[in-house]
């Protein structure tokens, strides 16, 4: 796998953080962005602080002006692949934006 790829993971905790950790392991050499909803930020930060990676960045999507923020996140992160680990559709605003892009969308590892 090339280290020049950028991966964006859309994530909501659901039943646990196991699927996110497996996905992060799969892309351990790539630059990875994890997009979470603001309601889940404490849970995700608590779990991910144990992982020391220079190429991991957590992005938080909050409620006000969500469409504008989602577009800004998409433009700033410039992902090559987007992985959907959002089991509860908390980030549906972002997913709707992806429908109009040419990005490759993959389902999360179970």
Image (cartoon, rainbow, N blue to C red):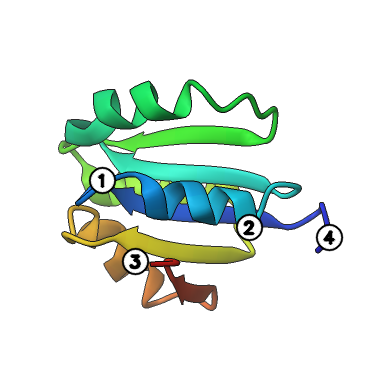
What is the crowding at mark 1: few (fewer than 14 residues within 10 Å), some, or many (at least 20)? some
Q: Is residue 71 visible?
A: no
Up the image or down, 95 lies above or below 75; here it is: below
Q: Give the distance between the C-alpha atoms of the residues marked 3 and 2, in whole angstroms.
A: 25 Å
Q: Disc 2 marks which residue?
A: 26
Q: Give the distance between the C-alpha atoms of the residues marked 4 and 2, in whole angstroms.
A: 12 Å
Q: Give the distance between the C-alpha atoms of the residues marked 1 and 4, in whole angstroms.
A: 28 Å
Q: Nearer the viewer, mark 4 or mark 3?
A: 4
Q: Is residue 38 visible?
A: yes
Q: Give the distance between the C-alpha atoms of the residues marked 1 and 2, in whole angstroms.
A: 18 Å
Q: Disc 3 marks which residue?
A: 97
Q: Disc 1 marks which residue?
A: 13
Q: Position of residue 64 (x, y in %)?
A: 16, 36
- The residue at the point 48 percent across, 74 percent down is 106
- The residue at the point 22 percent across, 34 percent down is 40
Q: Disc 4 marks which residue?
A: 2
Q: Position of residue 73 (x, y in %)?
A: 45, 45
Looking at the image, how many numbered discs can be counted on the residues? 4
Q: Decide which of tag 4 and tag 3 comes sooner along the chain.
A: 4
- Tag 4 and tag 2, C-beta contact below 8 Å: no
Q: Is residue 100 found left or right of 30 in the rendered image?
A: left
- Tag 1 and tag 3, C-beta contact below 8 Å: no
> Between 9 and 13, which is closer to the camera in this rendering?
13
Kindly state the secondary structure of the residue where label 4 is placed. loop
Kindly state the secondary structure of the residue where label 2 is placed. helix
Q: Decide which of tag 4 and tag 2 comes sooner along the chain.
A: 4
- The residue at the point 50 percent across, 64 percent down is 82
């Amino acid at each position: 796998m090339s280290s020049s790829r950028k991966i964006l993971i859309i994530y909501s905790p659901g039943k646990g953080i196991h699927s996110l950790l497996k996905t992060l392991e799969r892309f351990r050499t790539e630059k990875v962005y994890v997009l979470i909803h603001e309601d889940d930020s404490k849970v995700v930060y608590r779990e991910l602080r144990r992982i020391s990676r220079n190429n991991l960045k957590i992005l938080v999507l909050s409620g006000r002006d969500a469409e504008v923020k989602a577009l800004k996140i998409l433009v700033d992160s410039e992902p090559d692949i987007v992985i959907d680990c959002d089991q509860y559709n908390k980030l549906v605003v972002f997913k709707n934006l992806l429908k109009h892009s040419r990005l490759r969308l993959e389902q999360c590892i179970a």
